[in-house]
Amino acid sequence: MDTIFKIIGIALITCVTCLIIKPVRPDFAIFISIVGGIIIIFFLLSYLSGIFDIFNNIFEISGVNGSLYGVIFKIIGVGYLTEFTASICSDTGNNSLGDKVLLGGKIIILVMALPIVTSILDIVMELLPQ
């Protein structure tokens, strides 16, 4: 709970600083916004180990192929990175470019998810009576 207050504080300080700096130096305002976002991401890194442990347990219990483990984390990474990049594009006034980054991320996620869909279909086919 303490971390969310730090994240909110950093976000608010970053926003106010950007509002103050933007009329004087718009290029610095973009830099400050990016640095604020990176600092927030560093606060969230400590939670990743817990997430990895939970996914490990899920894969051990379910018996799903371990290679899908990496695919799922790559999909999650692509999703977060494209959203973060699209937000930066929007912050700089390039909404159209941000939309294209999101579209690209969605297409890449779809392609990366195909092995998971195939694996699920194989499991379902094994459960159906022949």
Image: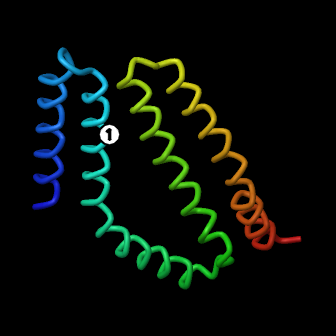
Where the N terminus falls, by quadrant? Answer: bottom left
Does residue 102 appear to the left or right of 34 in the view shown? right
Residue furthest out toward the right? 130
* Amino acid of disc 1: Ile
Q: Quadrant of the C terminus?
A: bottom right
- Residue 22 higher or lower than 37, as above or below: above
Query: Which quadrant of the figure has residue 115?
Result: bottom right
| Residue at the disc numbered 1 | 34
Between 39 and 87, the one lying in front of the other is 39
Classify 10 Å Cα crowding around label 1: few (below 14), some (14-19), many (20 and above): some
Answer above or below: position of 23 versus 2. above
The residue that appears at 27% across and 35% down in the rendered structure is 33
Please state the horizontal and vertical placement of residue 6, each as a whole percent of the image: 12, 53
Q: Residue at x 23, y 21 (%)?
A: 25
| Depicted 33 relative to depicted 111: above or below | above
What is the x, y in percent for residue 40? Answer: 26, 51
What residue occupies the far top of the structure in this picture? Answer: 23
Query: Residue placed at 67% from the left, 44% from the top?
Result: 108
User: Which residue reaches farthest bottom?
Assistant: 60
Q: Quadrant of residue 102?
A: top right
70 and 16: which one is in front? 16
Which color mode does the image show?
Answer: rainbow
- Residue 94 is situated, as x and y percent measured from the top left of the image, at 46, 19
Looking at the picture, does residue 58 appear above or below residue 88? below
Label 1, secondary structure: give it. Answer: helix
Please state which of residues 107 and 29 is positioned toward the viewer in this rendering.
29
Provide residue 118's location: percent of width, then percent of height.
Answer: 77, 60
17 relative to 51 in the view: left or right? left
Residue name at image x 72 percent, y 48 percent: 111
